[in-house]
Amino acid sequence: MVFPDRRTASVLLTILLFALALAIVYVARTVIVIFAFSILFAYLINPIVRFLQRHSLFFRNLRGPHVLEAYLAIIVVAVLLSHGLFTDVRKNAGRILSTIPGLTNKVSSGEIANNLGNNLGWADERADQIRVFLERHRSNIERGLGEMEQAAPAAFAGILVIPILAIFFLSDGEKLADQIIHLVATKENHGALESLAGELHLMLQRYIRAKVILGGLSLLYCSIAMLLLGFPNAIALGILAGILEFIPVAGWMTAAATIVTAGVLTHSHWIWMLTLLAVWRILMDYGIAPRVMGHELEIHPLLAIFTLMVGGAVGGIVGIYLSVPLIAVLRVIYQRFAWPQTDTTLPGRLVDTPEPRGETSVMA
């Protein structure tokens, strides 16, 4: 029996280990995604924690109490927002829930087109066209609703778990980063890994800053549009739209549905608002968001659009959200190892100055 030489055995072993790692990542993809969202959520909350820690009279050297203060403030804001926005919804929650099955049946069968046509004064031909379109896609609509119903429990569980995991990243992120570096580093590359961690830390900060900018723009646009159109609770609805901007696809769809529903129930100019939301979505997806992301992460806007489209095709909503930071992380790692002896930072580039020792953690 002929055994392969050492070089061939090494190559085969490397391929086997790589395949095993891919298999593990595929099996544990849900857990990995939850941890990734937890890290991003921690980066989102971290400025609030640092602000509270910097201006606190007590426990200034401890992060734990200020993390709890930040969460308490977020809960209070969420309660006040929901109290002012969903008062009528809470009063009629039972009636709304009981009408959902009938509404879904009307949508899938196309009957809702006739109802809308009668209420809005559409021509019979227009209502028939919409009804025929819904009937042709009835199987797709029912399949999509079924998938949403099946994914709802897992999504709800993830929403509960992500903030809890983020508490650990906020409180002990620096220790965790040091332990990971100590585990994988050698004496020769310890400094390089610390520098790489600092660059990744800054990159994730800039990604979250870009998301905050996009959320703020959506808040201003929706609030001003609803104030001009006479919507009730325009500011609260605008805040909701800004917050949901952090969630790709499902976020803006939920915000649009909420705004349009509020307009229908209050007899506001909801058709004009729906048109403005459609225009804003096109501007945001193909103009504003790629440029903001490209500026903050130093990625060309066209590459950002391509990344988002590929991420959506591969991973759906999760792929859309994680594709841009993943490409930015790979870019930082490639630059670090492609030119290990060269200073690749330029004035105004991703890494402006060397990170202090305390800033190389997952959560500084």
Image (cartoon, helix red, strand yellow):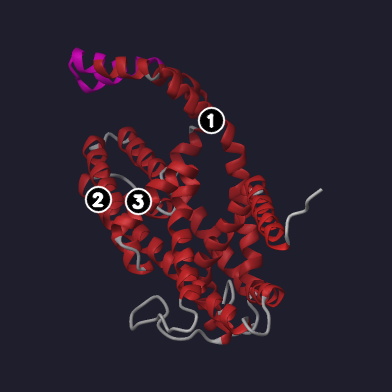
Q: Residues within 10 Å of mark 1 (few under 14, many from 20)?
A: few
- For marks 3 and 1, give the CA distance: 26 Å
Q: Nearer the viewer, residue 76 or 280?
A: 280
The reply, left or right, for residue 146 in relation to residue 103 is: right
The reply, left or right, for residue 55 in relation to residue 125 is: right
| Residue underneath mark 3 | 306
Which label belongs to residue 147?
1
* Chain-order first, disc 3 or disc 1: 1
Image location (x, y in percent) of residue 3: 78, 53
Q: Is residue 123 magenta?
A: yes
* Chain-order first, disc 1 or disc 2: 1
Position of the C terminus, as image quadrant, is bottom right
Nearer the observer: mark 2 or 3; the answer is 3
The reply, left or right, for residue 248 in relation to residue 301 is: right
Q: Nearer the viewer, residue 18 or 268?
A: 18
* Chain-order first, disc 2 or disc 3: 2
Q: Is residue 112 magenta?
A: yes
Residue furthest front as drawn: 1
Q: Which residues are magenta?
A: 109-128
Q: In percent of the image, x 50 and y 55: which residue is there?
A: 78
- For marks 1 and 2, give the CA distance: 29 Å
Magenta span main SS: helix
Counting labels gives 3
**Amino acid type, callout 2:** Leu
**Amino acid type, callout 1:** Glu
Q: Residues within 10 Å of mark 2 (few under 14, many from 20)?
A: few
Image location (x, y in percent) of residue 177: 64, 74
**Amino acid type, callout 3:** Phe
| Residue underneath mark 2 | 283
Image location (x, y in percent) of residue 361: 59, 76
Q: Nearer the viewer, residue 118 or 25?
A: 25
Residue furthest right as drawn: 1
